[in-house]
Image (spheres, coloured by chain):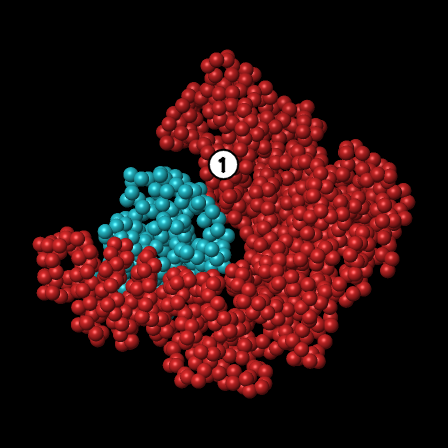
Amino acid sequence: MAYAYLFKYIIIGDTGVGKSCLLLQFTDKRFQPVHDLTIGVEFGARMITIDGKQIKLQIWDTAGQESFRSITRSYYRGAAGALLVYDITRRDTFNHLTTWLEDARQHSNSNMVIMLIGNKSDLESRREVKKEEGEAFAREHGLIFMETSAKTASNVEEAFINTAKEIYEKIQEGVFDINNEANGIKIGPQHPTTNSTLSSSQGSHQAGGGCC
Amino acid sequence: MLHCPRIAGGGCFLGGSLKFENHCYDALITSFYLCHPLIFRACLSVRYMYHVLTKNTTVTDHNRNLLVETIRSITEILIWGDQNDSSVFDFFLEKNMFAFFLNILRQKSGRYVCVQLLQTLNILFENISHETSLYYLLSNNHVNSIIVHKFDFSDEEIMAYYISFLKTLSLKLNNHTVHFFYNEHTNDFALYTEAIKFFNHPESMVRIAVRTITLNVYKGELDNQHMLHYIRDKTAVPYFSNLVWFIGSHVIELDKCVQTDEEHKNRGKLSDLVAEHLDHLHYLNDILIINCEFLNDVLTDHLLNRLFLPLYVYSLVSPETSEERKINPQVSLYLLSQVFLIIHYQPLVNALADVIFNGDLSVFTPPTDASAGGVRRFVKPPESLERSLELSRHRGRKRTQKRPNYKNLGEEEDEERAGTARGGGSSKGSRASGETAEEIEMVVMEKCKVSELTEQNITDEEKTAAATRTHTQRSRPFLDMVYSALDCADDDYHALFVLCLLYAVSHSKGINCDLLERLQLPVPDQERSSYSLVLVERLIRVMNQAAQPDGKVRLATLELSCLLLKQSVLSGSHCIIKDVHLACLEVRFPGEEIFLDMFEDEYRSMTNKPLNVEYLMMDASILLLPCGDVEKTRRAIRVFFMLRSLSLQLQGEPETQLPLTRPEDLIKTDDVLDLNNSDLIACMVVSKDGGQAQRFLAVDVYQMSLVEPETKRLGWGVVKFAGLLQDMQVSGVEDDSRALNIVIHKPSSNPHAKPLPILQANFIFADHIRCIIAKQRLAKGRIQARRMKMQRIAALLDLPVQPSATEVLGFGQTANASPSGLPFRFYEQSRRAPNDPTANRSVFASVDKVPGFAVAHCVSQHSPSPLSSPSPPSSGSGSTGRCDSVTASTISAQTGPFSFSLLPSIDDGTFLEHTPPSSSGGESEGGGAGVTVVSSTPSTPVSAPALAPSLTPASQPTISLLTDSSADALSVESLTLLPPADSPHLHPCTGHVGVAPSLQRRLSVPVCTRQKTLSTGGGRETSWSRRWPDSREAQSTFGSLCARGGAACFLARMRQDAQPAKFFTHPD
């Protein structure tokens, strides 16, 4: 499918914070969480529309590969956006953010857009990290912030799409060198004509017909 | 359907199929109601899915969506079954459902179905948690059939899903599951062999996934001897030889990129190539540290003999004109540093280091007997990886169908060439991509051909002598090259890389200490009693060159020199440096006035962010030819700090003057102060969020504080807030003449964050008069605070203190005081509990990849940083503040010289004996003896005849950290040294007349102090370079801007100029 740009994302954060669930929730809505079934996936792609342009998001989860230094550093470098996820019900996952962020800044290209995500916002009763704390952390380190729930899909769309918007703005400002694919941005095979009728920010392009 | 809305939600797996075959479904619905248990539901639905699959064995446009949805639902049911009831799996297995999947795949059903199927498999394997469920899925070899299925890999989405699928599978590898993937009898290991075929895929994420898969395989196979043999015998050589060639080709491209660079246009590409090289090294290291001896032998052999030695090391000495030289020596030094920093595998790095430090020219004589043990050369593997894998596997079998993928392009050619190569000739010619396939041939050196020094129990003196002797007598072309590249007379381009290399080698865990000790290379944290004179003197020479006013030595070079020097001469807690060498180090600061913020900022970032050599070597920009500007003041400040810290450490003295602002000296919240003699102004503080409080405003030397009366003691107050005056902005409030708006920012050097205000409030006073008084007091206090610090700096640097600064609040008596005499704080009598967490700074204080350019570049994008924003945007006193800062910054922009006194030896005999002939030219050496008599120079400015009259230096006291008192340093009988204007080499000296009896009595001559003032802005100099503005341009720019009242713009501009990328570039 033709796209104007392809943005590569990575998702980082401690294990168990719901990274792969967020990813699946975003890329394939048909997997509604049922029977307390937590389903995740480590790779996904989806088309969205920003400013009338088709933009393909390709999201790579780095879970399970932390033991290899070469792998994490390469992942960081190849991405235009990163979702840094913690679990609002687990204080330690919030405390580890600085380490993650330091890693990300060190290995990524300097323009990478990082979004901070406090996941599992549906579990309000077990909350250990206040929303204000997340906001403060984000402000202090120049990140965008959002609380999401992969389970109820709350804010999941917004998290991915807002990150894309920020990247898109940076492209417009000329900050990103889009001819350099190592930045995690690829120009589409052809520049599509502005297709205003397609508002596919609402559905997975592979979602096909007849689902949900 | 409508009568059971909850079912669709509760049993979502059914949801999709509902729409298609309602007639079948109705019966099921009934069952659901009757038999509520989920298990039963799941079983039923899986049955239903099966039904759909059997009815739709052929994929058509009509049933495509149905099939996709069915596959998806099956996944969901299976995952549910894994977590709840395995009977679902029985059914799945019994009906051989994977066969349906394969059948669908093989119909060329198009990418839509393929992608869905691959994603489904991904989800399935990722979410299965029980081993037994996994075994179910893996049995019958269907997964392997899917792995070898010829997908359309030219489709990037299919490629991505496919490789993710393989990655997911590789994460499931363990002792048990491996048997499902590796077939001992047929020698098949599709997961691995299919994956490595994409090792050089153009898409980086795919390459990363391939690396992950291989690492997972290597890690998981340790116990499986059969598989180990298979991997080593059938795949290791093809894979590693191709990998090594791939890396080498990148290196050649990298070199080309450096050589063809103009105006740093290649920077983006270069940094990719450098990062790519690092990725490769980290990957190789990750393989090596899995520590699978079997593999490591093969890998080490390939790396050493087909990459590092022939391509990297050989390039160090091969003549420039030689066709065999593939890359330039500086690139080679840079890459070798990276190798040593990252890879620590002993057999590999030790052998490599041994060649560099002990190898000799005999390795370059043409091979007489090529069969004697393999030829070391960098050469393209005769076959492509895919082909050699096929050959080893399908030997005797019919060739399999080709995959339609990007690699097919030009494959025929490759095969032909491979054929001829096997036919007996060496492969020649070049590929379309421009990679040369010429060969570098070298004779094999015996692996450990080390010059075995016979001495076993030699004294250190002997060792030293031996080191010197062998250095001069034995031919060690590589080592010679390394040492001679330390010369910074023209620039420090090579020197920086050599320093990195030496640092990396000396810190490598994989290198034998014997090797280092034999050469007296500094081994960190080791007791020693001698050090390499050759090295130390070269290091000191680098430092001296760095301290030249127009020094070409970059900060990183200087810092590394300091590091290596410390490593060399600090043995445990004591310092073994010879006096004669210590004497060569002197620290002095050039300018008269320093921009305060920069001074503190630089100190902060230096102490917060010590040099990380590994990060330094990740920065591609150091490969580009140095050109352009460094912000000179920052550089000068940093040079001062580094040398001061080095000098103090070598003498074992603690730092007592820095940092200027010590947290423990500041007033803090909840301190109780005696305010009996202080002027207090009552006010109402209205914070931004609406909170109100009645407070008294007090202005201290460095801080303003808001206090509340202490209830128990009259005239005492409790501090409710305290903030640094230097970080404060005061402005009026538009419609209230009694109010002031006050913002104090937190001093922070985090360039990613906007300045964080610690106070942002309106202060409402009793009346207009009190408001004006408060405003003036704050503004004066601000100027005063900044001046006070400037004085402390001046005292620290031993510069003349400006008395004017002290008049404001009556601190006149401190004008001539020593730095310690200046008050840290005003309220002497008040004290509070010393519970200072001084080290609680953010880890992101500076994200500079390299130190030195600080944070200035971000400032232009946001508002001015609090540290540097000099202007309270108010009228009257505010403008005074602005002028204050600008003045300081501008003056400091034109940095004067650093002077290093190059001391003659006191201990003539030893010095002479230990000074080896220097290798670099241009020194005033008296031939082989290496003796120069340096005439004792009178200690007057006249000693610098080369200087223009306008630059005639003013006589200034010198901070000599060696002296006990400054009075001594000024002693006339002291001897001086070489004028800094002279070539800054370390001169071996002897036979001085009137050598001072003690090192304490010395004086260096300050030279070349530019005495320009702001007024010279009009009569500006014309000969500055337009492309790379230096301080002089800054100065003249300032002049013109000032004329237009654009001082603030100028400041912003100065900061803008300090781009991070330019840190590694040279001044001028």
Q: Position of residue B35 (x, y in %)?
A: 13, 54
Q: Position of residue B44 (x, y in %)?
A: 17, 61
Q: Position of residue B146 (x, y in %)?
A: 33, 71
- Position of B743 relative to B28 (above/below): above
Q: Quadrant of the C terminus of chain A?
A: bottom left
Q: Which residue is mark 1?
A: B746
Which chain is assigned red? B
Residue A57, by quadrant, is bottom left
Q: Residue at x 28, y 54 (%)?
A: B83
Q: In the rendered structure, which amino acid carries the disc numbered 1?
A: Lys
Letter of the chain that mark 1 sits on in the rendering = B
Q: Nearer the viewer, residue B95 or B496?
A: B95
- Position of B103 relative to B470 (above/below): below
Q: Nearer the viewer, residue A22 or B932?
A: A22
Residue B938, by quadrant, is top right
**Does any portion of residue A139 appear in the rendered image?**
no
Q: Residue at x 8, y 54 (%)?
A: B3
Left or right position of B503 against B79: right
- Position of B712 relative to A168 (above/below): above
Chain A representation colour: cyan
Q: Nearer the viewer, residue B667 or B106?
A: B106
Q: Quadrant of the N terminus of chain A?
A: bottom left
Q: Residue at x 27, y 76 (%)?
A: B107
